[in-house]
Image (cartoon, rainbow, N blue to C red):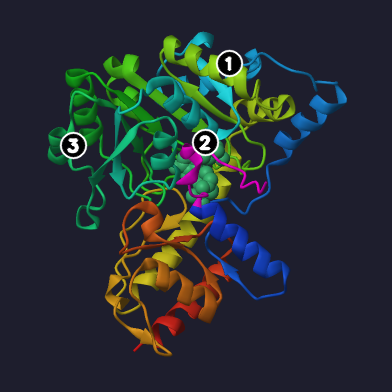
Amino acid sequence: MSWEAPLAERVRNLKPSPTLAVDAKAKALKAQGVDIVNLSAGEPDFDTPDHIKEAAIKAIRDGFTKYTAVAGIPELKEAIAAKMKRDYNTEYSADEIIASTGGKQVLYNIMQAILDPGDEVIIPVPYWVSYPALVELAGGVPQFLMCSADDGFALDIDGLASMITSRTRAIILNSPSNPTGAAYSEKDLEEVARLASQHGFYIISDDIYDEIRFDGKAPANVVSINPECRDRALIVNGVSKTYAMTGWRIGYLAGPAAVVKATSKIQSQSTSNPNSIAQKAAAAALSGPQDCIQTMNSAFAERKEYIVSRLRGIDGVKCVEPSGAFYAFPDMSAFYGKKHAGSTISDSLTLADYLLESARIACVPGIAFGDDRFIRFSYATDMAVIKEGMDRLEKALGELE
Ligand code: PMP
Ligand code: GLU
């Protein structure tokens, strides 16, 4: 009898993460010797700072290689609590914090813990690629709130208010944002906090880029703006971006003890504790010297200036000034309808394909973030690569007819 390896419905419509897929394709082409300019990956090009690596090496030498408490070691939880106090002036106790295998697992656990089938989660567009899939994997229904580049991708508060139903369970905020780099204003955060209290839903605040800012503002989230919404705020963060630690896989949640306990149960039945050695490294990152952040941010700021001015210098490209993170998200729709060698550029996918095939630039089509007019370029790579990428982009767009 032939066997077709049946799969569960939940996975049949699930697509792999498009950002990771483009990055993998670019890396594979590079390994084959193709001269690719990779502006796809949302991953700092810097090495993890030495004092963090040393903490991990010490952990291995000390034999810190066994299971730990499911929700993380006390030392890491204390470092997370100190960060919450330092940046958000908010106190969290040990039972209100859990460490997981990256911010992604934190988000996965949250959705599993708070959503029943049919529960709605409001997701501002453009969104980070994994939010809708994470909601759907838990049986939830994403509700998309369109935000406009003309307003610098600010939250549409009236639009948000009109979307709230009795099934609204949460909203996801990501500020500064992947992919736009936009940071929400204090006023908008205050409004979200007010609506969440009035209607009773969670605010999932994905703060993973909170310390990568160029607008001179300190990290801010709903809890620092309005401490009263602490009982409904689920603060998600991690060390991947701030400390160039993407491969170490440590993220964390600070939130109400009941939700933390629920995610801890899920974690105990699925992955157990996050990696013991990486926990020691993350504790060193959060509690050690913080000047490495400034060093990396200065480089990101310089690259941001450069890439945005090059993009804006190309006729037809419009680009909002990012406030943080390490992405430029220009509107490229002026090129849709143009042709190259008989084929038409009709959307962000065909444009990204054209750029990969013809100019050997890897970038992520806007459709992956919910808005087809845009393309995402990561500038978490060195200046020479960005410059080469922009030269190639200008030439490739100029060749369209
Ligand atoms: N949120 C956003 C907005 C991101 O860009 C990322 C990057 N992958 C994550 C969460 C998760 O990061 P990690 O799992 O590496 O902590
Ligand atoms: N967050 C990064 C990005 O958007 C890493 C890839 C991913 O986890 O999706 O490129």
The overriding secondary structure of the stretch rendered in magenta is loop
Residue under pointer 3: 160
Is 10 magenta? The answer is yes
x and y, in percent, of residue 394 in the image:
43, 80
The Cα–Cα distance between marks 2 and 3, rounded to whole angstroms, is 25 Å
For the point 58% across and 51% down, the residue is: 44
Q: Is residue 1 left or right of residue 7?
A: right
Q: Is residue 108 above or below residue 93?
A: below
First in sequence, mark 2 or 3: give its number: 2
The Cα–Cα distance between marks 1 and 3, rounded to whole angstroms, is 36 Å
Which label was assigned to residue 78?
1
Q: Under 8 Å from ligand 1: the CB of mark 2? A: yes
Q: Residues within 10 Å of mark 3 (few under 14, many from 20)?
A: many
x and y, in percent, of residue 134 in the image:
44, 36
Q: What amino acid is at disc 1?
A: Glu
For the point 70% across and 34% down, the residue is: 52
Discs 1, 3 touching: Cβ within 8 Å = no
Is 47 magenta? The answer is no
Q: Is residue 291 left or right of residue 346?
A: right
Residue 191 visible in rendering: yes
For the point 49% across and 45% down, the residue is: 12
Q: What amino acid is at disc 3?
A: Leu
Q: Under 8 Å from ligand 1: the CB of mark 1? A: no
Q: Is residue 48 left or right of residue 150?
A: right
Residue under pointer 2: 104
For the point 68% across and 69% down, the residue is: 30
Q: What amino acid is at disc 2?
A: Lys
| Residue mark closest to the camera, 2 vs 1 | 2
x and y, in percent, of residue 182 in the image:
33, 48
Q: Is residue 105 above or below residue 126?
A: above
Q: Which residues are magenta?
A: 1-17
Q: Is residue 253 above or below residue 41?
A: above
